Amino acid sequence: MILEALGAAVLGLLLAWAATVRLAHRLPARPLVHATGTAGALLGAFVTHSALGSGFSLVPFLGAAIISAASLSLLLRPSRARRSVTA
């Protein structure tokens, strides 16, 4: 259980790092993004582990990745796209 939690936290940090590298202009400060990714991954692993039990080994990591990506997507700001206004 401890290794599963540590693995989920590392997975959340990796997803948050990838988001900050790819979408840095649309995200808030890095510490918030990293904390959100880690907390989302831990929550996802906990919920998946609670729902399925301890018989599954890789499925909680899938749940961790899904919930972490979903919580990171909530931090995205709209892009500053220029729109031309025609009269």
Image: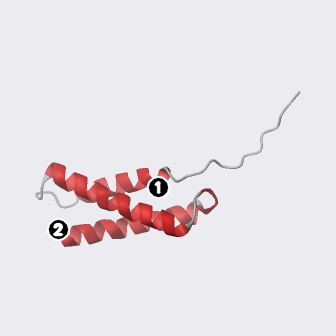
From the image, tell me which residue sits under label 2. 1
Residue drawn at (43%, 66%) of the image: 35
Q: Is residue 62 visible?
A: no
Marks 2 and 1, Cα distance to the nearest angstrom?
Answer: 24 Å
Tag 1 or tag 2, which sits nearer the N-term? 2
Rendered location of residue 68, percent (x, y): 39, 56
Residue drawn at (12%, 59%) of the image: 54
Amino acid beneath label 1 = Leu
Q: Residues within 10 Å of mark 1 (few under 14, many from 20)?
A: many
Q: Are marks 2 and 1 in contact (CB under 8 Å)?
A: no
Q: Is residue 63 visible?
A: yes
Q: Quadrant of residue 7?
A: bottom left
Question: What kind of element bears circle 1?
Answer: helix
Amino acid beneath label 2 = Met
Which mark is drawn over residue 72? Answer: 1
Which residue is outermost to the top?
Answer: 87
Residue drawn at (54%, 65%) of the image: 20
Locate the C terminus and report the quarter of the image it occupies. Answer: top right
